[in-house]
Amino acid sequence: MTAAVPMQVMEFRYNWRRDEIQAFFELPFADLLFQAQQVHRTYFDPNRVQVSTLLSIKTGRCPEDCAYCPQSVHFDTGLQTEALLPLDQVIDSARRAKQNGSSRFCMGAAWRSPKDKDLDQVIAMVQAVKAEGLETCLTLGMLTRQQAQRLKDSGLDYYNHNLDTSPEYYPTIISTRTYQDRLATLAHVRAAGIHVCCGGILGMGESRQDRVGLLHTLVNQRPHPESVPINQLVRVEGTPLAMAEDFDAFEFVRTLAVARILMPKSYLRLSAGREAMSDAVQALCFLAGANSIFYGEKLLTTPNPDTQHDQALFTKLGIQPQ
Ligand code: SAM
Ligand code: DTB
Ligand code: SF4
């Protein structure tokens, strides 16, 4: 007999308790993966993976002090900084991403929050990328209600704004903003009618309870975020987390599986950290319910597996990118 897990797993709930979420983490690995597969197969084709490409449209010199981030002005990471990119460079990158098979183009800026005049330029980028036949996603930091509405009116499909970890652990990672600030922007994005992309980072020295706490916040949002990126910390020299311990691959896979069970219809993105993962671990991530990745040899500033390697992995696994 497998451990008892409530049968309401197949329902959509927004009132999960932390102890219930913890119980999924404690299941034997095979039982957890089996449940995650059952949920996954109810809502998705298990052999299809959505593919997005990232572009850093403004790089470095960010005033925030996120302990994981190579782009913070507080840490010396030797990063080459870059002002907001010209529109034609963004269009060139979007065209290449489409040729490589990406269906969504995500543009990220190292801002605490955009100024209204920055937004004018970013809106032109959203419109141009959409005209290339790609879905659009932005991640620009905190937004006001009015800014979120302007982005919606410009046709933006997704906004990425991560909660990163539990509310308790958050202040040890970032001191320049609060969890509540993050939740407020997420509420503005949701109210404007933009699809929400919201997830976190594993491997920052947090405990399993913090991973439970992150999922607890995510799964009790109604509706669930449409897209949930789960990043493994990319350790960058010069950041306070450069020397973080190796993160256990099984705990990474477990976290994805629990997320899949609790947010059955959300796209779960196996995000940063794939460069440090074997193909076998990535295959387990797909088995646990991950169904989206970033294509292309760079994330925002750090390396990602090259597209040919990913295409070979998909062929080996019989996965169709879309
Ligand atoms: N500045 C905006 C913000 O923080 O919302 C947008 C860009 S920021 C780089 C986007 C996300 O990348 C962060 O929220 C964080 O979750 C993730 N990230 C940044 N550095 C990372 C790293 N070294 N490893 C894994 N994920 C990272
Ligand atoms: C997300 O959750 N991961 C992506 C995307 N959203 C913007 C960013 C990962 C960044 C990794 C560090 C870097 O390349 O600078
Ligand atoms: Fe700035 Fe975003 Fe990096 Fe934090 S994660 S330092 S807000 S670019």
Image: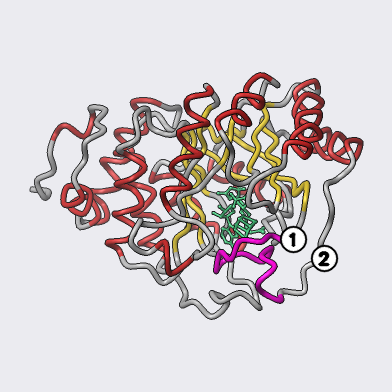
Q: Residues within 10 Å of mark 2 (few under 14, many from 20)?
A: few
Give the residue number, with chain letter if any, for mark 1. 60
Q: Nearer the viewer, mark 2 or mark 1?
A: 1
Residue 174: % across, % down: 50, 64
Name above or below for residue 133 compared with residue 30. above
- Quadrant position of residue 119: top right
Extreme residue toward the bottom, this view: 243
- 144 drawn magenta: no
Give the quarter of the image for residue 73: bottom right
Please name the residue shown 48% across and 57% down the image: 201
Q: Nearer the viewer, residue 157 or 148?
A: 148
Name the residue beneath numbered marker 2.
80
Position of residue 32 measured from the top left corner of the image (x, y, whole percent): 26, 48
Q: Which residues are magenta?
A: 62-76
Foreground residue among 306 and 180: 180
Q: Amino acid at mark 1?
A: Gly
Label 1 Cα neighbours within 10 Å, binned few <14 / some 14-19 / many ≥20: many
Q: Look at the image and say whether residue 74 sits in the magenta stretch.
A: yes
Ligand 3 within 8 angstroms of badge 1 C-beta: no
CB of mark 2 within 8 Å of CB of mark 1?
yes
Instruction: Specify whether 284 is left or right of 316.
Output: left
* Image quarter where ligand 3 lies: bottom right
